[in-house]
Image: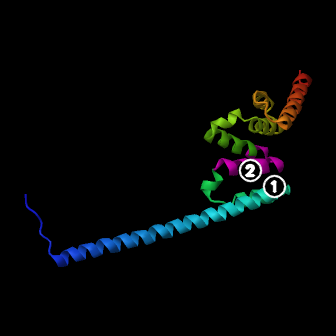
């Protein structure tokens, strides 16, 4: 086996090159991280502003802010839920249902959440999809953890039953 002999000057050049590459890599990494931090801060501020607007029942304005977040944030279940609630509050039930469906696909555990199931059933009812709404509302009753959701569930189930009896 042959060994490579490197003299002192060559060794120093190699060390300097490795150091320069390392420093450039660190600067690039910090630069990328700083940009990600800025995007995160901007999205967080938009999210917080949207929450405040929702509390003031300014749903259309909150919805507009949520659409300004980056795509990754828009796909998060928290933003999808807020967008669904804003859509439902403004009468856009199809969008609300679409958002809740996307949430359900990414977080199947939501199918054991009484409030989620009740809201889903409510929007389906308001969209006129009574049979599907009834399924979600009945499923919601299995997870009786929120008295307000239970009352609203019963209200919509009674309305569906009245429509079914009136339709016969």
Q: Residue at x 70, y 63 (%)?
A: 45
Report helix, strand or loop for mark 1: helix
User: Which image quarter is the N terminus in?
Assistant: bottom left
Vertical placement of residue 168 versus 136, above or below: above
Q: Is residue 4 left or right of residue 165?
A: left
Q: Is residue 94 magenta?
A: yes
Residue topped by disc 2: 82
Q: CA distance from mark 1 to mark 2?
A: 8 Å
Which quarter of the figure has residue 52? bottom right
Q: Nearer the viewer, residue 122 or 32?
A: 32
Q: Is residue 63 magenta?
A: no
Which quarter of the figure has residue 130? top right
- Residue 32: % across, % down: 50, 67
Vertical placement of residue 79 versus 28, above or below: above
Which quarter of the figure has residue 62? bottom right
Q: Residue furthest left?
A: 1
Q: Earlier in the sequence, mark 1 or mark 2?
A: 1
Report helix, strand or loop for mark 2: helix
- Residue 9: % across, % down: 18, 79
Q: Nearer the viewer, residue 148 or 124?
A: 148
Q: Determine which of the numbered discs, if any, sits on residue 130 in the image.
A: none
Magenta part of the chain: 76-95
Query: Label 1 neighbourhood size at 10 Å, few (<14), some (14-19), many (20+)?
Result: some
- Residue 116: % across, % down: 74, 39
Residue topped by disc 1: 54
Q: Residue furthest bottom?
A: 9
């Amino acid at each position: 086996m042959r060994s490579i002999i490197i003299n002192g000057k060559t060794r120093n050049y190699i060390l300097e090159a490795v150091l320069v590459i390392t420093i450039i890599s660190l600067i690039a990494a910090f630069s990328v991280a700083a940009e990600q931090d800025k995007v995160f801060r901007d999205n967080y501020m938009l999210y917080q502003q949207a929450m405040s607007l929702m509390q003031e029942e300014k749903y259309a304005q909150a919805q507009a802010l949520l659409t300004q977040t980056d795509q990754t944030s828009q796909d998060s279940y928290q933003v999808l839920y807020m967008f669904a609630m804003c859509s439902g509050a403004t009468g856009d039930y199809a969008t609300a249902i679409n958002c809740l469906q996307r949430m359900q696909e990414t977080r199947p555990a939501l199918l054991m959440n009484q409030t989620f199931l009740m809201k889903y059933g409510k929007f389906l009812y308001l969209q006129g999809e009574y049979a599907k709404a009834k399924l979600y509302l009945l499923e919601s009753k299995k997870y009786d953890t929120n008295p307000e959701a239970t009352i609203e569930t019963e209200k919509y189930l009674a309305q569906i039953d009245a429509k079914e009896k009136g339709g016969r």
